[in-house]
Image (tube, helix red, strand yellow):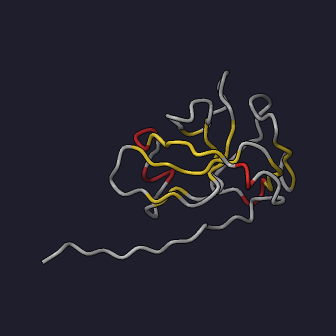
Amino acid sequence: MPKLRSETFGSGDQSWLGSTHGIANARTSTLTLTAFTAATHYPDGYIPSGTAVNAADEGATVPFTGAEGEALGFILTDAPVDGGAVAPVPVLRHGIINVANLPGTFTVPTTGAAGFVFVGGAA
């Protein structure tokens, strides 16, 4: 008997986008899934759209911490996590971000956020 599973495809909740500016220019990055914590980053089996990432190395994208040298990006669409070590995702590198609608907890960084305008929250 084949091992079957069902999947649902969609873009996720993109209410964190303050406009459509930048979405056509999202760059493909490879998430290093071992850097993400299941209970924190993907309790529902996917990393949600709007998750802040450090996109300084597009071949090894990890969660954004605000440390020196990081380059802020946001995962544009939900990223399913299915037992792999890496996953390709579109990452928004510039645009308008509605902070109040981002998933999880996010603090607007003082450095490393070039290209972003933050609205609708603590900026």
Q: Residue at x 52, y 55 (%)?
A: 47
Q: Which is more toward the observer, 85 or 52?
A: 85
Q: Position of residue 64 (x, y in %)?
A: 61, 37
Q: Position of residue 28 (x, y in %)?
A: 58, 46
Left or right: residue 67 compared with residue 118: left
105 lies above or below 64: below
The residue most toward the top is 68
The residue most toward the left is 1
Q: Residue at x 45, y 40 (%)?
A: 32
Q: Quadrant of the C terminus?
A: top right
Left or right: residue 33 compared with residue 25: left
Q: Quadrant of the N terminus?
A: bottom left
Left or right: residue 46 compared with residue 49: left
Q: Position of residue 13 (x, y in %)?
A: 66, 67
Q: Which is more toward the observer, 91 or 122?
A: 91
Q: Residue at x 62, y 51 (%)?
A: 75
How many dots with numbers?
A: 0
Left or right: residue 107 compared with residue 21: left
21 lies above or below 114: below
Q: Position of residue 105 (x, y in %)?
A: 66, 49
51 lies above or below 12: above
